[in-house]
Amino acid sequence: MSSGLLFLLPCLILTPAATLEFRYHNNPEIEQYLLQVNASNPAITHLYSIGQSVRGQQLWVLALGLSPRRHTVGIPEFKYVANMHGNEVLGRVVLLQLIDDLVRGYRNNETWSLQLLNSTRIHILPTMNPDGFDESDTDCQYSQGRTNYNGVDLNRNFPDAFAGLRRQPQLAEQSCEAEVRAVIGWLRTESFVLSANLHGGALVASYPYDNSNGGSELVGGASVTPDDDVFVHLAKVYSYNHASMYKGDICGDSRPFLEGVTNGYQWYPLAGGMQDYNYVWAQCLELTLEISCCKFPPVQQLPALWTDNRKSLLAFIQQVHLGVKGRVFDGSGVPVQNAVVEVKGRTNMCPFRTDRHGEYYRLLLPGNYSFTVTYPGHEVLTETLNVPHGPDRYSAMKHDFMLRRITTSANPTQADPTQASLTPSCDYNLRLEAGGVVPRPTWTGLGAVLGLAAALQSLVG
């Protein structure tokens, strides 16, 4: 090979990616594609790994936004996860297409992409179960490859709030699979606000709870969260922006779903699911999106299936701007972590708390809401807010809470230390330091060199 060609090939690698093919890329090809996108768009993308599968394959995430490497105060964190069942594969395809679409739109100064990436940090995990994908076949309904390499269904392996584990979730975590532990660690490093995990085998948007222990959450056959109105709205946003999901009866071999949405428990009870874990312990509202009747659709259907889901995927991201966001400041004007921010009538199993930046995010539909903020050593603060619709403006309503220290000369209502301090059931999942408490490899240094070498080899091979 001439030295001139060697000089030119890295330049070719760093140019915008060619049109992404509609096919099922294997795991090394996905890794190479993510590397190429990251190298070509360093200002708006950041490639990192949250851990490894049982067989040692990296679980790569691509973050997209104006500050892709780190959180920016006031910018909500959003994520999509696909392929946690290895044989449910359309999610891999549509998330790669979504990455391609967002990057191309940004490069071409298209308003829709600029608005999303300027206002949101978007994390995309194309495959949570690469080992399962390697074992899967192309059958439409059967389940070879569903589980991870150890034969465990990852969507039954998360600590479950309804299984008596609320007070000792760490013990349950120790027995979780590698892929599940990676996601749990990921949730500790970022304050995710909204999320969806993509599946196949039905056409419906499913929302929490997936499980119940027969308590007050069980209403009319559904297991209802304190934020049920928001979850139903989110599910309908996806369903009605989809080409046909809202019809509710497209897949002939499954039950009909009114408006294309369902409460998870009402569909079928499920213990150890990822969406309940996100909501209960990470204060992240997550849906399970079943996006194709067939688990492994024929390749020739992929362009149409991407078209069916594209508008829904984008509209759902935009919902991260529902409700209210802001910070809580103590009596000295310093933002505080672990302040409890509660909304009247929405008693969460684990109270929503401010993160390491003193931030809170509450996804709420338009209306009037009474907020109560508690923090040790400070007076309890209660304020009523009139919340507008934020997604159209790509920003939730911004409101900071300013606390007052308790004085000895007065006896105002004060925070109950046992209420506002950490509780045994909810203390382990807090984001303690910038960058998170769980080390994770990033695509830098030698990894980047090796990846570039792989891309170079593919171009000259």
Image (cartoon, grey):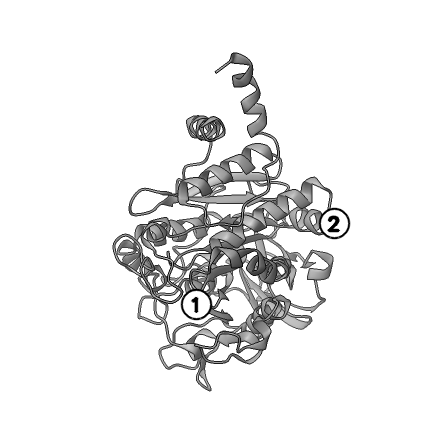
Mark 2, other Cα within 10 Å: few <14 / some 14–19 / many ≥20: few
Residue, disc 1: 201
User: Can I make out residue 170 in this image?
Assistant: yes
Residue at position x 56%, y 50% from top?
97
- In the figure, is residue 264 to the left or right of 77? left
Using the image, determine if residue 444 lies above or below residue 387.
above
Q: Nearer the viewer, mark 2 or mark 1?
A: 1
Residue at position x 48%, y 16% from top?
1
Front position in the image: 222 or 405:
222
Q: How many marks?
A: 2
- Element type where label 2 sits in the image: helix
User: Mark 2 to mark 1: distance in Å?
Assistant: 34 Å
- The kind of residue on which mark 2 rests is Thr
Residue 224: percent from the left, percent from the top?
Answer: 48, 77
Residue at position x 54%, y 44% from top?
63
- Residue 312 quadrant: bottom right
User: Can I make out residue 437 in this image?
Assistant: no
- Element type where label 1 sits in the image: loop
Screen quadrant of the C terminus:
top left
Using the image, determine if residue 371 lies above or below residue 8.
below
Residue 7: percent from the left, percent from the top?
Answer: 55, 17
Front position in the image: 316 or 138:
138
- The kind of residue on which mark 1 rests is Gly
Residue 276: percent from the left, percent from the top?
Answer: 43, 66
Residue 227: percent from the left, percent from the top?
Answer: 54, 72
- In the figure, is residue 294 to the left or right of 239? left
User: Which label was assigned to residue 87?
Assistant: none
Residue that protrudes farthest toward the bottom in the picture: 220
User: In terms of sequence position, does the residue under pointer 2 or pointer 1 come before the other?
Assistant: 2
Mark 1, other Cα within 10 Å: few <14 / some 14–19 / many ≥20: many
Discs 2, 1 touching: Cβ within 8 Å: no
Residue, disc 2: 111
